[in-house]
Image (cartoon, grey):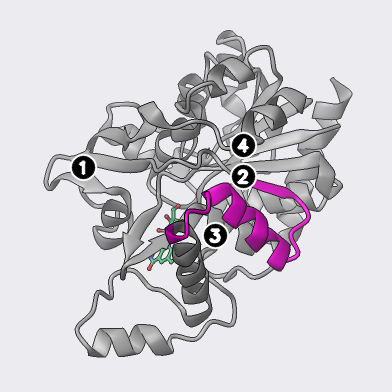
Amino acid sequence: MKFVAFAGGVGGAKLADGLSRCLSPADLTIIVNTGDDFEHWGLKISPDLDTVCYTLAGLANPETGWGRVNESWQVFEQVQQLGGEDWFRVGDQDLATHIERTRRIKAGQPLSHIVRDFSHAWNIGQTVLPMTDQSVATFVDTVEKGELSFQEYFVHQRCIPTVKSFRFDGIENAQPAPGVLEAILMADAIIFCPSNPWVSIDPILKIKGILSALSGKKIIAVSPIIGGQTVKGPAAKMFAELGIQPSALAVAKHYAEIITDFVLDAHDVQLTGDIEKIGIRPHVLNTLMISIEDRQKLAQNMLHFMKRD
Ligand code: FO1
């Protein structure tokens, strides 16, 4: 069976990693949000693509989930000393990724080619695809600071400003990257990883042609919210600031028109009735991924019911 996972952020990378440990590489394609991409220090940075690739390659920093393990910070410290921007931490090995990606983009290489070559260099067997090769930039409109670019909101402002709405600049002209629609059409099931619905999964869904490619497919979303709290990141806070009580049910409702199945944590078992009421099949699993084994176990349990039905 072939599976496609939509991912963004650390939660997405963790489940992608769990799935990669249960499936042969040819049976798993990960389509990654690129709305978080931005230019920093004059370099093109694609945080979600790098977080997925580093995680699949076993190169990710296990504490943060992003950036590299066994990292050094020589360049960052020198830039800081020179009065450069130090709100976004770029390690020495991570810097190489941004330098080479920037060189290739300036040479006219599409992002999907760059990810393919980097995946090869990092011995990643699965197919990792950007959602699009065109540039899409997520902006967060906030009460206190007006419209902020995503990294400015997420890292520099530490997700503190109150969100009002989101804008995905460039989404109208963005085409699915080569291989994206084919992977979706060939897939036996699509998995929405436990990523932020608003700024990681929604941008992928808004790319022209993706929603129609998904129609009729078995689609399983995994809740990034357990017991009303996001495991990591601002998803629950965003729901609350948009006037929606944060919960696994709120996430299921967010995707209600699209998904067929929904994975929620055992903490939220009392919500299964409400999820069934909106026509979605609930699956109660342990969704908290602290260890590598947790990731593999969650993926295994999901594949078990996906292969059964
Ligand atoms: N997230 C932070 O909270 N602080 C950082 O300094 C930071 C640096 C960073 C460097 C490279 C990279 O690929 C990701 C990085 N992230 C950092 C995470 C980044 O903000 C992502 O957008 C989040 O993981 C959400 O997708």
Residue 208: within the magenta? no
Q: Nearer the viewer, residue 90 or 261?
A: 90
- Residue corresponding to mark 2: 129
In the image, what residue occupies the spot 82% across and 40% down? 27
Chain-order first, disc 1 or disc 2:
2
Q: Is 89 positioned to the left or the right of 122 in the image?
A: left
User: SS class of the residue under badge 3?
Assistant: helix
Q: Disc 2 or disc 3, which is closer to the eye?
A: 2
Q: Disc 3 or disc 1, which is closer to the eye?
A: 3
Q: x, y percentage for residue 283?
A: 70, 27
Q: Residues within 10 Å of mark 3 (few under 14, many from 20)?
A: many
- Residue corresponding to mark 4: 178
Task: Give the amino acid type for the residue marked by disc 4 in the picture.
Answer: Pro
Chain-order first, disc 2 or disc 4:
2
Task: Give the amino acid type for the residue marked by disc 1 in the picture.
Answer: Thr
Task: Check the image and report above or below for 57 versus 48.
Answer: below
User: SS class of the residue under badge 1?
Assistant: loop
Q: Nearer the viewer, residue 94 or 158?
A: 94
Q: x, y percentage for residue 160?
A: 24, 52
- Residue corresponding to mark 3: 50
Q: Quadrant of ligand 1?
A: bottom left
* Segment tinted magenta in the rendering: 106-129
Report the disc number at residue 31.
none
